[in-house]
Amino acid sequence: MHDILIEEKILSENDAIAHENRRAFIERGVFVINMVSAPGAGKTSLIEKMTPLLLEALGAFAVVVGDLEGDLDAVRIAGYGVPVRQITTGRACHLDAHDIAHALQWALGQNARLLIIENVGNMVCPAEYDLGEDMMVTVLSVAEGDDKPLKYPAIFNASGALIINKIDLAAHTDFDIPRARRNALAINPALQIFETSCRTGDGIEEWCAFLASKTLARRPKADTNR
Ligand SMILES: Nc1nc2c(ncn2[C@@H]2O[C@H](COP(=O)(O)OP(=O)(O)O)[C@@H](O)[C@H]2O)c(=O)[nH]1
Ligand SMILES: [Mg+2]
């Protein structure tokens, strides 16, 4: 009982900070996505593939990367000339709103209308921690099984978009893409679903067009008041 109360307190503190983060991002017209997945589903690879398309559509975007240890992903992304901020979480299996609050001024200083947060690879804990993003995006690779929406419903429920990645490998697995879609939509009928391959580039354009249009629809408050 005591543990449950402590957990509820942590989550309500997190929600209050997330609310402030969201307010600041909306005020400045920055659209924010929070990419979540099991380790290795392809979050960093997707960001790498998205980079030229997003730069063309938006001019600039920034990335915050959360990892338990090391800066391998941040170095990969920085290699494309994209501003990236690394957050090392140590033993924490997810980013929290406090982590993003610390990166907030940096993110707002990048003159970018889109912030991509790559969360720590984990399909459970990130679902509970609002960061102040506009949209959580779950990445599910075909190597993980098409039953995952039914086994980890919270993360699919919290997401606005689902990217089914590594479709180039689908023929080598028993992953059934239509069944994965059905399972995901049974949990969350509002999910926007994309199918991608970072190997072949399939589907990346469609996903980036969706993300760019969401970003461009967000205007700084000062503009909308005019
Ligand atoms: N065949 C194939 N491999 C992929 C694809 N996307 C990522 N990978 C590989 O999957 C591994 C993990 O990718 P990474 O982007 O680091 O995953 P993350 O942990 O979610 O950031 C790497 O070896 C990638 O090259 C894909 O679409 N197809
Ligand atoms: Mg990564």
Image: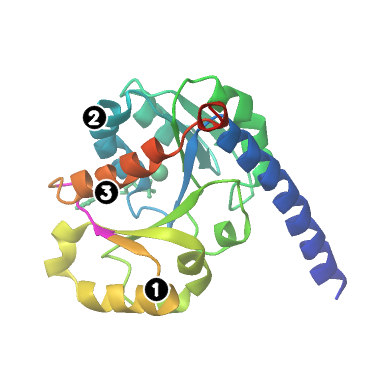
Q: At label 1, which amino acid type do we have?
A: Pro
Question: Magenta span covers which residues?
Answer: 194-199
Tag 2 near tag 1, CB within 8 Å: no
Residue to which mark 1 is pinned:
189
153 vs 68: above or below: below
Quarter of image, res 7:
bottom right
Q: Secondary structure at mark 3?
A: helix
- Residue tagged 2: 52
> Residue 135 or 106: which is nearer the viewer?
135
Color theme of the render: rainbow
For the residues labelled 3 and 1, say whether their Cβ atoms are less than 8 Å apart. no
Residue occupying the point 18% across, 60% down: 167
- Determine whether 97 is above or below 8 in the image: above
Q: Residue at x 36, y 41 (%)?
A: 44
Which mark sits nearer the N-terminus, 3 or 1?
Answer: 1
Q: Which comes before the other along the chain, label 2 or label 1?
A: 2
Q: Secondary structure at mark 2?
A: helix
Residue 126 falls inside the magenta stretch: no
Residue 90, percent from left and from top: 63, 43
**Kind of element beneath mark 1:** loop
Question: Tag on residue 207?
Answer: 3
Bin the neighbour count of mark 2 within 10 Å (Cα to Cα): few under 14, some 14-19, many 20 and up.
some
Hey, which quadrant is residue 196 in on the image?
Answer: bottom left
Residue at image location 45% in from the left, 38% down from the top:
218
